[in-house]
Image: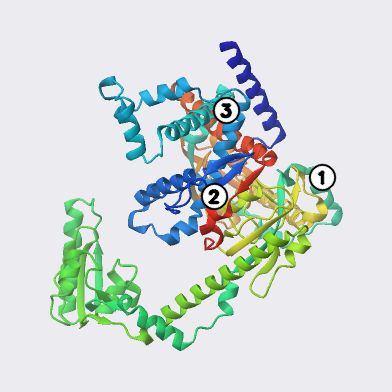
Amino acid sequence: MLNVMRERFNQLKWILIAIVAAFVFGFVFIDMGMGGAGGGAGADDRAYAARVNGETITYRDFDRALYYTEQNYRQMYGDQFSPEMLQTLGLEKQVLDGLIDQRLLIQEARRLNMEATPEEVRRRIMQIPTLNPDGKFVGTELYTRYVTGQLGYQSAAEFEDELARDITTSKMESALQSSIIVSPKAAEAEYRRMNEVAKIRYVLYPAAREVANVSVTPAEVDQFYKENQAKYAHGEQRLLKYLVADFARLRTMIQPTDAQLRQRYEANKEQYKSGEAARIQHILIKVDPTAPPEADAAAKAKADSLVAQLRGGADFAALARQHSADPSSSAQGGDMGFVERGQTVEPFDRAAFSIALNQISDPIRSQEYGYHIIRVSERRPPAVRSFEEVRPMLLSQATDEMAKDQARQEVARITSIIRSKKPATADEFAALASDKISSNDTQWFARNDSIPGIGNNAQLTQWVFGSKQGDVGDPIGTQRGIVIPYLAGIRPAGVAPLAEIRQRVEADAKAAKARDIAANALRTAMAGAPAVDAVAVKTGLTAADTQVSRQAAIGGFTGDTTELVKAAMAAKPGEMVGPVPVGEGAVVFQVTEQTKVTPEELKERASQYLEALRGQQARSLRIVLLERLRKSAAIDINQQALRSATSQPAA
């Protein structure tokens, strides 16, 4: 048996290595944040949520996963969790996708003879403390009562089936991680990347200073493209055609009437109640909560001085602009407008509703901010805000809701047409556009790119890179509006043709020329200069300080800083280094402080990073494996199971 398992494991290992070779290795891992709601109560337990290669994921399994995941989200977000958040997250689809992925992994495990055995399930049950108090099993009757009552399963067999799926999935995950080999050198590089930093003083000569005077010929563009092919290489890409109910566009087509707004106002008057409020002028002398007593005493003395000046007739607005540390009111001469009771910290709130009108308060100490000086010019009792006062808010709310309603109705209509007519070409799909739904195309994009015209959307990206050319997806909520996607093209990894990116290559060639000019100017200025500040004087630029690390963007820089990071880590403190090319131009710098990893640290810590890298690459490998399995799988989704994602798409 051991030999069989070893052979199966080796078979899996080489299959996985072959998969990696077929794809671009090292995709960035994106956790599928599963979530859901306990919908579908009373649904027929025999109904299915999806079928994967003929195997059924029951509606009951789907419903249970939704319920428990929604509970997790409720615990995470508390009172902020709402039905709108549920829609926005698209939890129903994400949960079902997670169950489909689990089933695909189980089927692959079965093929590799790695399914959970009854003995493994039994051992897992014996590890559950509730069922084994004092190390002794409670017995079949209590066990069955526990899993069908407290855990909510229909039977012990259903519970054991889910345990078996969980064990099988864990075995596959373990096999994936075990198949990854990470060299100690890679672990060392990762540890250095996370822990080595340097502080530098630098002068940046921006290429933009010269680029307006630079020109390139067509031949130079061609040559630059040939010499920098790697710069224009791309991984596997997708081309998307999509129909979108663009909320911003729909809003411009909607004009609610005053009658509609008044109806909304009357129906929701309770929402527009305002509490007791005071019109306040405010000066804040800020004191950090961790400040020593002497700092507090100095702030109190300053506040006392200002109170004396104000009571002597000084202009409150002028002193607020000069001394107040309250960013929201100081520019307005300390005027906070009307502030409702309970909206400020307790000492401030108490004073605001107790001092006499138009009197200068004594300094009011709040632990969070420091010393407050206030004057209250007016108070008003609780009241319902008038229609005219809330009309702009009513107009915005009504326009938003009407736009989303129109979007949902039109998307539902077009989705129905798609299901009945099944457009066979991109042109047939685009022809379904209407006055409320427009047809759009993206440019070619890779998995980790922002989707052109749409932006970052994990749910849409997951669909795009898990679908076949010609597939039409279900409606998906995006920041732009509800989108119906059509996968118009798949392009393997390669180099983008010059004709497609010529404008970009020309700009890059100009920037490269300008960087060379910038580097030459710095090189000339460095001659005879004792330090970076002298180079700054010679070039008319400004010297600045920043921190360089191997893992993050460098403050003060945009674009590629790879060479600067290498140079800063290799330089000796005080040594003037440069010119070094960066994305924006060229730079000269001196290291003022440096933290380097020692051999002792590496020996002690690198093993931790080795395991972290293995886990990261195993997750990437899991994504690649699931992509392969999905492409060859027969997946039938019961759209009723995703009713919240289709009849009311995430907005």
* Callout 1 crowding tier (Cα within 10 Å): few <14, some 14–19, many ≥20: few
Residue at 74% x, 60% y is 423
Q: Name the mark on residue 534.
A: 2
Disc 3 to disc 2: CB gap under 8 Å: no
Decide: few, some or many residues near mark 3? Use Cα within 10 Å; few <14, some 14-19, many ≥20.
Answer: many
Q: Is residue 525 above or below residue 360?
A: above
CA–CA distance in space, label 3 to label 1: 39 Å
How many numbered markers are drawn? 3
The image quadrant where one finds the N terminus is top right
Q: Is residue 131 above or below residue 403?
A: above
Q: Are marks 3 and 1 in contact (CB under 8 Å)?
A: no
Q: Nearer the viewer, residue 286 or 176?
A: 176
**The residue tagged with tag 3: helix, strand or loop?**
helix
Q: Residue visible at 23% across and 50% down?
A: 290
Which residue matches tag 3?
176
**Can you see residue 75?**
yes
Asked if the residues shown at circle 2 and circle 1 are in contact, with their CB atoms under 8 angstroms apart, the answer is no
Residue 406: percent from left, percent from top? 56, 73
Task: Classify mark 2: helix, strand or loop.
Answer: helix
Residue that label 1 marks: 226
**Whole-percent x, y for residue 121 in the image:** 44, 25
Disc 3 marks a residue whose amino acid type is: Leu
Residue 597 percent coordinates (x, y): 47, 28
